[in-house]
Image (tube, rainbow, N blue to C red):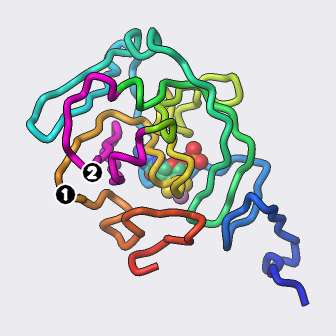
Amino acid sequence: MSTFSPGFQGRPRSTSDRTPPGQYLVDDWPVLSAGPTPKVDLDRWQFTITNETGRSYSWSWPQLMSLPQSRPHVDIHCVTRWSKLDTDWQGVSLDELFENVETQAEYALVSSYGGYTTNLPLEDLLDGQAWIVHTFGGQDLTPEHGGPARLLVPHLYFWKSAKWVKSIRLLDFDEPGFWEAAGYHSYGDPWREQRYQGD
Ligand SMILES: Nc1nc2c(c(=O)[nH]1)N[C@H]1C(S)=C(S)[C@@H](COP(=O)(O)O)O[C@H]1N2
Ligand SMILES: [Mo]
């Protein structure tokens, strides 16, 4: 007996040893947005980190682009069950942005232009695990996929990778974001299938 169920239309859904449990592979790239795509002008774009004492650190677009650039090559996993292997991005590591940030906080609440939010432990943004990316496959990130810049945290479900990223607030407590407040898991590890609260 097959251990993997085909789609309801009988279309086989492919997996590999790099597909987390309950996921299938796609070649295309679905767009998933909870609201309209915001228009973000580069000359007004700003990214801000605010620590638990209220101190802020901000970068303009030219300042972001002048920082050392990384080229993550990663697999991404959406909680709606699609996974996409071998995606190529360019952007700035969060390690770079946090270099001079003074903090003892344990949690981060990420906010987007347009109002989306998502939470994660600060340590999941550090040590080469997260980037603010502005290109995909060598092209500028398109607006529907989060351009001009989005967060990329590929080791967690893709809802943590906030499109149109605007700011990160550092907190001593874990505050749920948009999907987390609606019942999704506060951490969201695809390999432990942490889709919903209680998983
Ligand atoms: N600002 C914002 N970021 C977001 C979302 C959103 O609705 N708004 N959706 C999340 C979800 S659920 C997923 S799966 C990915 C989808 O990214 P994509 O549309 O580029 O595939 O973005 C995440 N980041
Ligand atoms: Mo998603």
Q: Nearer the viewer, residue 140 or 194?
A: 194
117 relative to 89 in the view: left or right: left
Give me the residue at 33% from left, 15% from top: 60
- Would residue 8 be counted in the magenta stretch? no
- Would residue 121 be counted in the magenta stretch? yes
Location of residue 86 (image quadrant): top right
Location of residue 174 (image quadrant): bottom left
- Where residue 139 appears, x then y in whole percent? 66, 23
Measure the alpha-carbon separation of dots 2 and 1: 6 Å
165 relative to 9 in the view: left or right: left
Q: Is residue 177 visible?
A: yes
Q: Nearer the viewer, residue 62 or 106?
A: 106
Please report the bounds of the magenta region as a residue range. Answer: 98-126
Number of numbered tags placed on the structure image: 2
- Where residue 134 appears, x then y in whole percent? 53, 26
- Specify the amino acid type for callout 2: Tyr
Are dots 2 and 1 in contact, CB under 8 Å? yes
Q: Dot 2: few (<14), some (14–19), or many (≥20) neighbours within 10 Å?
A: many
The residue to which callout 1 is attached is: 173
Q: Secondary structure at mark 1?
A: loop
Q: Nearer the viewer, residue 66 or 45?
A: 66
- Where residue 12 appears, x then y in whole percent? 87, 71
Give me the residue at 19% from left, 57% from top: 173
Location of residue 74 (image quadrant): top right
Residue 49 drawn above or below residue 6? above
Q: Is residue 33 visible?
A: no
The residue to which callout 2 is attached is: 107
In the image, farthest residue toward the bottom: 1
- Specify the amino acid type for callout 1: Phe
Give me the residue at 39% from left, 76% from top: 197
Q: Is mark 1 within 8 Å of ligand 1?
A: no
Mark linked to residue 84: none
